[in-house]
Structure formats: structure tokens, C-alpha cells
Amino acid sequence: MSLLVGESMVGGYGKTTILHNCTIQVDRGEIAVIVGPNGAGKSTAMKALFGMLDLSEGAVTLDGENITSLSPQERVTKGMGFVPQTNNVFVSMSVEENLQMGAFTRDDDFQDTIDQVYELFPILGEKRKQAAGELSGGQRQQVAVGRALMTKPTVLMLDEPTAGVSPIVMDELFDRIMEVRNTGIAVLMVEQNARQALEIADTGYVLVTGENKYTDTGAALLADAEVRKTFLGG
Amino acid sequence: MSTDTMNALVLIANFILVPGITYGSQLALGALGITLVYAVLRFSNFAHGDTMAYGCMFTILATWWLQSIGVSLGPLPTALLAIPFGIAMTAILVIVFDKLVYKHYREQKSSPIVFVIASVGVMFVTNGLVRFIIGPNDQQFSDGMRFLVRARDFKKATGLDEGLTIKLTQGLTVGIAIIAMLSLFYFLQRTRTGKAMRAYSDNEDLALLSGIDPKKVVLVTWLLVAALTTLAGVLYGLDKSFKPFTYFQLLLPMFAAAIVGGVGKPLGAILGGFIVAFSEILLTYAYKKLIGYIAGERPDGLVQLLSTDYKFAVSFMILVVVLLWRPTGILRGKSI
């Protein structure tokens, strides 16, 4: 059984149901990517996994433990890290302070984790005293990911990490995300840049109207003529 | 330097610099509290002035009691000993109001204007409490040494026509304000709780996601506000005199100070405090004597730009100018 599993999730906002029997799972050292057309419920599926949305049916388990009823904060302490799509850094605070805030729930000495984040994202080490709001879009995303890594999560969830950054920065971010994966963390992300994201994905989920349409390895989905035609523009 | 120039400089120091720095420090402490509430709780707290009166009132009551049992600080005012009691009573007041009033609206996720109107209600209640307990009249509570520098001694020592007076309360105001501001900045910049407050102010959702407890942040904010209001209230009361109504009137210059500097920015509140204080003094000062020393001949009129009765108009003018041309204030705070 995978580390994080959202099994047959049904839910939405208020009375509107967005997810219809949606299943997502990701395991240690693996990148899972959720892609699909606009309004397919990609971000909603991720929010459901993180507890920002009430499920009417289905369950979320982390390492075999049922966490369906836990709040997002409680899920963070269980080892889940979440990087929201927007407003994901403290703009008025320095890079280092952002990382310190990421480790707010930790009582132990977390300097070594900060050093690890600087090792992973060298540019952050150089700009540690600078306010996060003064950084470029790509650097900000690195701060956001670094902040989420401060709790030493076993699962890292990224909501469209490459939204609004240039193609070069996107490639660099994907490289970094693969490095995060190589440290043994399970990475789950929602992506608009479907083709590039599927290239680095171990598993890809194509959602349509809140349901699993195709599920396969990233490479297999890229090779599938039907998927290419419908979602990847040929 | 000629005697006239020296006299002119002393005149400026005596009637503009010393009162400006003192009044500016008092406004800055008040504006810091306003800006903290705005940054963390996200509303303009109209009860701030009356909370200052409340803190000062309990400090006065404790001072009278200390004086009655013969406790004295020698040359320093006894009120300094009573300030912790005033802060404690104010802390209880603001926390009770938070639980009874603001907490409800936070849970409802009400818009900021609802909080503002609620704070007007809190202002009336606080004002009523103060008048009920100590009455609406002037109260004297300063004791100890009156002057650090006396005009007569200064004239004798320098041989100038103009004297310089520095009251002990003015020196204390500036000294205590500096200590309070440095401690506040140390707290916000260096401590874990202070950083959590800044993080919560910066991005509430991300702060919650990072495991920062909003209840604790709100509580610490009110404790800081209690300390800042009481200090500002007592220093103003020692320097001028204690009269509940004057604290309500301070609301306008304090808000002007917070907005000019940039709402939500502590440094801006301090900067704004001094800008408002010096604007008021420079615009209401009668320049007749000063021009006399500089030009060698005194003009017939008072050469006063604005009667002191209109000093509140100065805050209004500053507010209008800032809101029209730079609504986020000098240090680019939040727009109000």
C-alpha cells in the first residue's frame, strides 16, 4: 500500500460536488502528478488530501493510518508538507525567517534542516537575509518549497509550483523537485504544464470532471495517443 | 557665533525641539499600539485613546495609594512604580473585551468596518468606566523633581536672554519611549513569538499552515497593546495632566501618525509620531521672537501660522494629504 492514499474521494465546496470517486496515491521516493483540463478538480483533489475540504465519501490514509478527520495543521505534524499555489511565502520576512516559520512546530534544533534546504537551493543560502517579497518568482517558489520542507515531511504536496514562471525556471524547479524526490520524500503535484510534468512523473493521474480518467506511469501517458490528442495538444 | 544666533537656537530648542520630541514620543508609543492592532487583528482600534486613559487611571490610583503609605522614588515620580499595575489592569480590560466582543466577530469573519464600529462601542464603554471610577476632571499625580534644566539656571550659566527648560517628565518620556521601542523591536525581530506575530500579520493562511497558533498571537498582541497604551497614557499624563477627554482627542493625531508612517509598520508609527508632533508645533508656534533674533527687528504681529486652537486641523490636513497622494504611507504599509 502506498504512503499517502486518497481512496474513492467524493467532496466539494458547500453543496457543489467536485470530486466524484477520485483516487490518488503516492509512495516514498516517487513523483505523482495530477493533470487534466481546467475545472477538472486537480487542486480540489490535492486540497482534499490535505484536509482543506470535507469529504462526503472516501478516505485518506497516511502510512496506513486513517487521517480523514484531521485538520491541515494536524496533517502537517503527521508529516505532510503543503505548498499553496499563491501567497506561499511570508513576503515581508527574510528567507531565513521563512524557513524558521516553516519549522515553527519543531522544538528541536532545526539548523541542520535549514542547511539542507540551502544545499538543495543554493540561491536561498546566498539570499538568506533578503525579504522573500524581493525575490524573483522562481526563487520565491524555492522559498515556498523550502519552508514546507522544514518540518521534514514524508509527503510534499505542490499546487502548480511552476505557475507563472519562465520555461527555464520551470526546468530548474523540476530538477529541484526531482532532487527532493531522490531524498526519499513522496512528491505529489498538480501541474498545468502537463507534458513537462509527466516527463518527470513516476505516476500520472489524468482527472476529468473530478474522476480518474487515465492513470499510468508518466512515460506511458505521454506515449498514449488518446491522452496526447485530448490533453496534451497532439 | 553672535549672541542673537545663540538666543535663536535656544529659542528653537526650548519651544520647538524639546516639546516636539516629547510629544512625538508620546504619539509614537500610541501609534505603535494602533499599528500593532491593525497589523495583527486587521482593524483600526478607535478605543485606543480611551484605553490609554484607562491604563493611566489605574496607574494614578496605585500612585495615590503608594503616596499614602509613604512610598517614594525620591526625585523620580512615584507613578513609575505604579505603571506595572496599570499595565496589568489594562491587559485584563483588553483581553476581556477581546473575548466578549472581537472574538465573536473574528469567528464570524466579519469585515474590518464591523470591527471598527465594534471598537467605537468599546471606546464608549471604556470612556464610561474611566469617568465612573475617577471622574471627568483633571487629576495631578506627578511628584518628585520638576526640572532637569531650569530656565533661570540656564540663563545664569550661559548669559543668554533666552532660557531653556527641560522638565523631568520630558526627559523620562523620551527615555522610556526609547527603551519601550527598542524592546518592542527586539521582540518582533528576534524572538520566536515576535516572528510568529509578524508571520501572522504577513500571511494569515500560511501562518496557520505553519502551525502558528492564532489565539496565542492575538493574546500576545493585546498584552503588548496594554503595555504600550498604559505607558503612552502615563507619560502623557505626567507631562501634561490627566483628563479623560484629552485622551479621546489624542486619537486623531495618533491615527494620523500611524497612517503617515505606513499602517502596520512599527517603524512608520514612530516616524509618523514625530512628523505629526513637529507639524503641529511648527504650524502653531508664534515666530515673532525668533524672527526678531534672526532679522534684528521684531515684526508687529505674532507670525503664527495657525492658532493653537486649530492644532487638530493639522492632523486632519496631514491625513488628507497622505491619503490623497500616498495612501500606504511613507514606509509603504497597508492601505487603510
Image: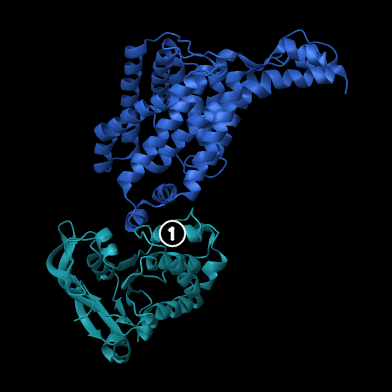
Q: Residue at the location (23% across, 62% down)?
A: A51
Vertical position of residue A156 compared to residue B71: above or below: below
Q: Nearer the viewer, residue A219 or A39?
A: A219
Pick out the residue farthest to the left. A57
Residue B167 location (% of width, % of height)? 62, 17
Residue B275 location (% of width, % of height)? 60, 31
> Callout 1, which amino acid?
Gln
Residue B286 location (% of width, % of height)? 69, 14
Label 1 Cα neighbours within 10 Å, binned few <14 / some 14-19 / many ≥20: many
Give the secondary structure at mark 1: helix
Q: Residue at the location (58% across, 29% down)?
A: B175
Pick out the residue farthest to the right. B2
The answer to whether residue B49 is seen in the rendering is yes
The answer to whether residue B317 is seen in the rendering is no
Q: Which residue is mark 1?
A: A100
Q: Give the letter of the blue chain.
A: B
What's the chain of the residue with tag 1? A
Q: Quadrant of the N terminus of chain A?
A: bottom left
The picture's colour for chain A is: cyan
What number of labels is visible?
Answer: 1
Q: Quadrant of the C terminus of chain A?
A: bottom left
Q: Nearer the viewer, residue B31 or A96?
A: A96
Residue B268 occupies quadrant = top right
